[in-house]
Amino acid sequence: MQTHPTVLIVGGHIGHHTLRRLQARLSSFVFKWIPTRESDPDCSSFRARLRRPETCLVVILNGLIRHQHGHDLVRLSRQYAKRVLHQHRSPSITQIQAALEMCGATKTNFN
């Protein structure tokens, strides 16, 4: 079974239009947007996703995520050796692409 490298986007509400643009531009990656709610203080749901070997990048949407979630995500990302990209409210396709190139994430790394 072939596993595709996955980018997690965390914060706010799912941006379907943005997800379609990301998938069109970077089609060899899977993008999963994890919405957060102000009332949800638990970050245990992040752990299982960060633990997966196909997860190659975590995009934290500052301004749309609880501060504690952001701190926990950075800590867990370090623990599982995942690259973190901080963005202000909206994912930048160009910056995500650059971060993926910097960490050497390509489709062939995950076959």
Image (cartoon, rainbow, N blue to C red):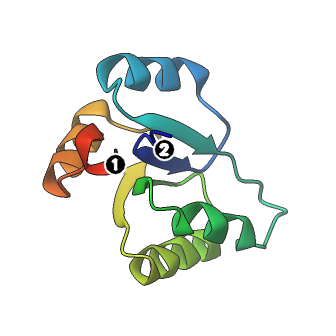
Please say whether residue 66 is visible from this viewpoint: no
What secondary structure is found at the residue carrying circle 1? helix
- Amino acid type of the residue that numbered disc 2 sits on in the rendered structure: Arg
Q: Is residue 92 left or right of residue 39?
A: left
Which sits in the foreground, 28 or 82? Answer: 28
In which quadrant will I find the C terminus?
top left
CA–CA distance in space, label 1 to label 2:
29 Å
Give the crowd class for mark 2: few <14, some 14-19, many >=20 residues within 10 Å: some
Q: Which residue is mark 2?
A: 89
What secondary structure is found at the residue carrying circle 2? loop
Q: Classify 10 as above or below 21.
A: below
* Residue most extreme to the front: 1
- Residue 2, located in which quarter of the rendered image? top left
Q: Classify 15 as above or below 64.
A: above
Please report the residue visible at 31 percent of the width from the left and 27 percent of the height from the top: 26
* Residue most extreme to the right: 39
Please report the residue visible at 68 percent of the width from the left and 38 percent of the height from the top: 13
Q: Is residue 104 left or right of residue 17?
A: left
Residue 110 is tagged as 1
Please say whether residue 40 is visible from this viewpoint: yes
Q: Position of residue 1 (x, y in %)?
A: 50, 40
Please report the residue visible at 82 percent of the width from the left and 64 percent of the height from the top: 40
* In this rendering, the label closer to the viewer, 1 or 2: 1
Q: How many marks?
A: 2
Q: Position of residue 109 (x, y in %)?
A: 26, 50
Which sits in the foreground, 104 or 75? Answer: 104
Q: Classify 95 as above or below 65.
A: above
